[in-house]
Amino acid sequence: MNFDFSDDQKQLRDQARKFLAEKCSPKAVRVVLDGKAPYDKELWKGLAEMGFLGVAIPEEFGGAGAGHLELCVIAEEMGRANAPVPFSSTVYLAAEALLIAGSDAQKKKWLPAIATGEAIGTLALFEGKGNPTPKNVKLTAANGALNGVKKPVPDGAIANFAVVAARTGSSGRENDISLFLVDLRDRGVEVKSLTNLDPTRGQAEIAFNDCKAEPLGGAGEGWSILTQVLDRAAVLCAFEQVGGSDRTLEMGRDYALDRIAFGRQIGSFQAIKHMLADMYVSATLARSNSYYGAWALSTNAAELPEAAAAARISATQAFQHCAKNNIQVHGGMGFTWEFDCHMYYRRANAMALGLGSLSYWEDQLIDRMRKKNAA
Amino acid sequence: MNFDDTPQEAEFRSQARAWIDANAPKQYEEELRKSSLGRTVLKNANILDVAKAWQKKKADAGWACLHWPKEYGGRGSSPIERVIWQQEEGPFGQLSRMFIIGHGMCGPTMMAFAREEHKRTYLPPLASGEKVWCQLFSEPAGGSDVAGLRTRAEKDGDDWVVNGQKIWTSGAHYSDFGILLTRTDPTVPKHKGLTMFFLDMKSPGVEIRPIKQASGASDFNEVYFTNVRIPDHQRLGEVGDGWNVSLTTLMNERSAIGAAVSTGFPELFEYCSGLMLEEGPAIEDRAVRSKLANWAVKASGLKYTSMRAISALSRGQRPGPENSIGKLVAGSMIQDVATYALDLQGANGVVSGEDAELAGRFQAMLLRAPGTRVEGGTDEIMRNIIAERVLGLPGDIRVDKDVPFNKIPTKGRG
């Protein structure tokens, strides 16, 4: 058994960590946090040059053709660095949707552009409150034109194109939903930036008014494609969350070692030690669940739906737990804008909602476990 | 990343599987499979007899104490082979419980510190289960603070004379031998005045009294020592070096990778899958599903953490500290799981024993659970270990560290 990443993959992780430590310091993240740029363009370019954007894209479409395990280790480092770039929307959502359902022409048009950093993509799924269900998709597609409003759309204000979930039927079933590809520079698209919990990753509202769109995948297959995309993204996001959990645990630990109160290191008080030990426990459980998700993703195993839901829940909980208690260990300073703790707290809580809420994934996990037991 | 055996591992697994298939006491398989925390019973047989017979059979065929050297009754297997064996042994592994302390802690301590002739005399029958060993460390005055123990050993000619009391000794009532940590010098700081011995539990002056636990069962004992004589050649390590010897014992306890910790989750999931509530099937209830999902990811997280450790073993590496989380997570989880299972039963959850739902499975679990959070290191000690050894945080400030043991206060008030 080798339930671990290979030496090459670990080397890639180290390479990504080193690169991000240099190019994505907290100071660089703050440029986007403070609204001085919509995302870090230099970093995005650098990620493309390193081959990170196309790591899981096949060589024939301009990628490195490595695979999803390689993408997982890079995702972990993106989370650790709190990178202010549209990585998850472009790479986990848009590129994966294209890989699963795109025609050869669609792949040729967008995937090489993603790998070189020229195209930013996203998934326009949500329409206000609610979780990913066919019922919540109200935007309509008829005669090749979309009408409706999507929000929140991750990185929607900076994206060049979007995969849009639309209603093409009214049977009340999953096959009412179809996917479309939209070039966001086309007529009939109106984009509005939204303020959000985590300004280092934008959210937008996009209105489609008789907007021309081409189908992505077969008519009525939208929901089944979306489910696969969300499962893959759940695993990849889990690695970002694992990276964030580890980083916030380290920040808390380091502060507990440096800070003196009552004449001693605060890390010598059991109240603090035990809080940090519990953070370590959550982070470890999340890492192990995510590894299982990575295995299932990379082998396209039948276990992927269950593994993805477990990784999603575990990593969401861990990042929220670690980010929250990191602030607590820091005390008052942790609640200042000046300290970096809140950047991770924002990211942790935004990520907890991005692919649907925790309670949605809890529900999914139980459904999938029951299905497996019944099979 | 894969879950596959190497060719050698696969070969070992198929041998182990074939032997177990041909030799295991299958008449008990169903009952062992259904056992859960607080309830491992065989209706028509004495579990001790069944366990001893299985252990002897394994030993005769060379499948006992796999990781021990052959000359002491083991098989000289690699750590990963030991894990594969545990996986293949499955429910029959429940029968090894009474030997865990002897095989996991006493044996390795003897191997590290006993004289060669003692090793050859005592270890093979320990491996084969013919002789059972216990570990006598904890005392009323020394639980988490083991080094605070007060049982005295005083030199008298070639013997040591022991007086005092031990507590929480698992299996003392069916043990033949034990390893015993004593205080030989109370005038030096507490860690420095300890000495380790092994002794025959039938020695004159040893009195064993079962403890009636909060659960009503009796798995543990108090052991009283009144002028018990132990020959000096049964000393393990130097006089005054008992603390270091005991660390060897405890480290061996923690390195038992792959030993599954019980979380109660499979039992709860199975229960909820078949349970009807007033509003419909429990498994379709939103609140129930949320609870189950939260426990599911803890259980799977522990499972895959253990897989990561096994992978490290398979590569010939020492597993990292990740495994220290198992007992901490599982201990409080099984308590919460049992509480919730009873909540789902409503008022009838109060009924325990044969008349209860599932013949009282979750009631027994609930009543046994507090012990899991205390035995083998309390939750708080486990958190200290993680904080200090994994995260590198400072140790607790120890006010008694440099004080002669006999000057340490013994009462909190008055």
Image (cartoon, coloured by chain):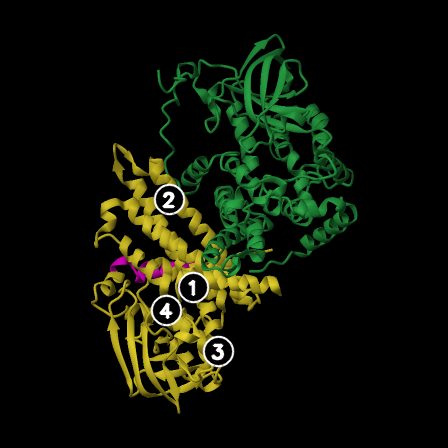
Residue placed most toward the observer, A263 or A286 = A286
Disc 3 vs disc 2: which is toward the camera? 3
Are the two marked residues, 4 and 3, in contact with CB atoms closer than 8 angstroms?
no
Horizontal relation, residue B392 to residue A260: left or right: right
Kind of element beneath mark 4: loop
User: Mark 1 and mark 4 in contact (Cβ < 8 Å)?
Assistant: no
Give the Cα distance between marks 4 and 2: 34 Å
The residue wearing badge 4 is A130
Is tag 4's residue or tag 3's residue first in the polypeptide sequence? Answer: 4
Q: Was residue A107 drawn as part of the magenta stretch in this picture?
A: no
Q: Quadrant of residue B256?
A: top right
Marked residue chain, label 3: A
Give the label, 1 or 2, closer to the camera: 1
Q: In what element is the residue under mark 3? A: loop
Between the C-alphas of marks 3 and 2, the distance is 46 Å
Label located before the other in sequence (1 or 2): 2
Discs 1 and 3 carry the same chain letter: yes
**Left or right side of B59 for B295:** left
Which chain did the image draw in green? Answer: B
The numbered mark at residue A276 is: 2
Mark 4–mark 1 Cα distance, whole angstroms, equals 9 Å
Front disc: 1 or 3: 3
Residue A360 image label: 1
Callout 3 and callout 2 share a chain: yes
Chain identifier, yellow in the render = A
